[in-house]
Amino acid sequence: MKTLAVLALCLVAASATPSIDGDDRYPIHAPSGYEDIVTNAIITRNYEAAASMTVQLKRRSSGRYITIIVNRLIRENKRNLCDLAYKLWDYMDESQEIVKEYFPVIFRQIFSENSVKIINKRDNLAIKLGDALDSDNDRVAYGDANDKTSDNVGWKLIPLWDDNRVYFKIFSVHRNQYLKLGTRIDVDNDHGVYGDDRADTHRHQWYLKPVELENQVLFYIYNRQYDQALKLGRNVDSDGDRRAYSSSSSVEGQPELYAWSISILN
């Protein structure tokens, strides 16, 4: 109990003097239950303190606690895990190694800005942009019925940090356009999804919420502006493709319908 109290004081000190050094100003001896302290720092968005203590765990060969924390946040569908991963990835090589070693492999692929494919769990279709340009020079986004390997379904997730959160611009490597939500709504109050040459509004920014299904880490993909999740429509066109929309209704608790896998394009 004495050690836990010391750790709690360390967390307060880290909050007062933000640092991600992981140095000996905040001594850690990783007792049982320590993961609750770090998890609380993450949930309350005290990422500087959480990252500092996470670095110390690695230095003290207590990485098993990092694994426990990561798996817990995935089970609880906390987007804060992506925020922490960004803070660790962005700061220094040592903290990047934590993401590489203790987070699911997709996290390092995302933050390395590798070309990835984004595939809907329900329909097993990869997101792409259509060929045709509309009057605004935008392209409609679809789930592709046939392609999972070409650059046409390749994307880069470009992170940006704002308001103590990580968001992503989702960039098509084939079309050189950014994924966005349109402003108009349909009869279901859903927004259409498009590719745009620019990425200058919150409609062009997205955030990820991890979820586990059948031992696979998937993500709900939410638009920042409308706080609606990406989904595929139920109508199929002549190519077997489905249009992409946002969902005006909640998708939480339904990963088999609305979650997406993100993996290296190959």
Image (tube, rainbow, N blue to C red):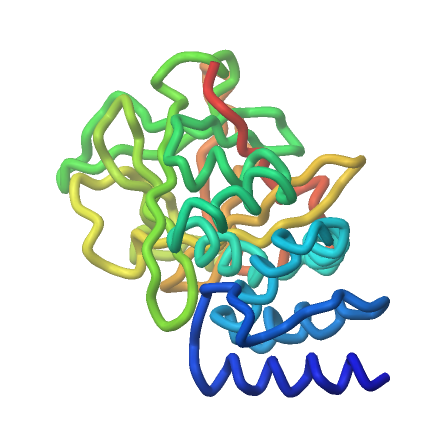
Q: Position of residue 75 (x, y in %)?
A: 75, 54
The picture quadrant where one finds residue 170 is top left
Relative to 23, residue 58 above or below: above
Query: Residue, x 53% and y 76% (percent of image)?
Result: 25
Query: Residue, x 58% and y 77% (percent of image)?
Result: 44
Q: From the viewer's perspective, tell me whether residue 1 is left or right of residue 30.
A: right
Query: Residue, x 55% and y 45% (percent of image)?
Result: 99
Screen quadrant of the N terminus: bottom right
Instruction: Name the outermost residue toward the front.
Output: 24
Q: Position of residue 264 (x, y in %)?
A: 49, 24
Relative to 32, residue 123 above or below: above
Q: Nearer the viewer, residue 260 or 134?
A: 260
Q: Nearer the viewer, residue 163 or 188?
A: 163
Q: From the viewer's perspective, tell me whether residue 37 is left or right of residue 164.
A: right
Q: Position of residue 224 (x, y in %)?
A: 40, 61
Q: Position of residue 263 (x, y in %)?
A: 54, 28
Q: How many marks?
A: 0
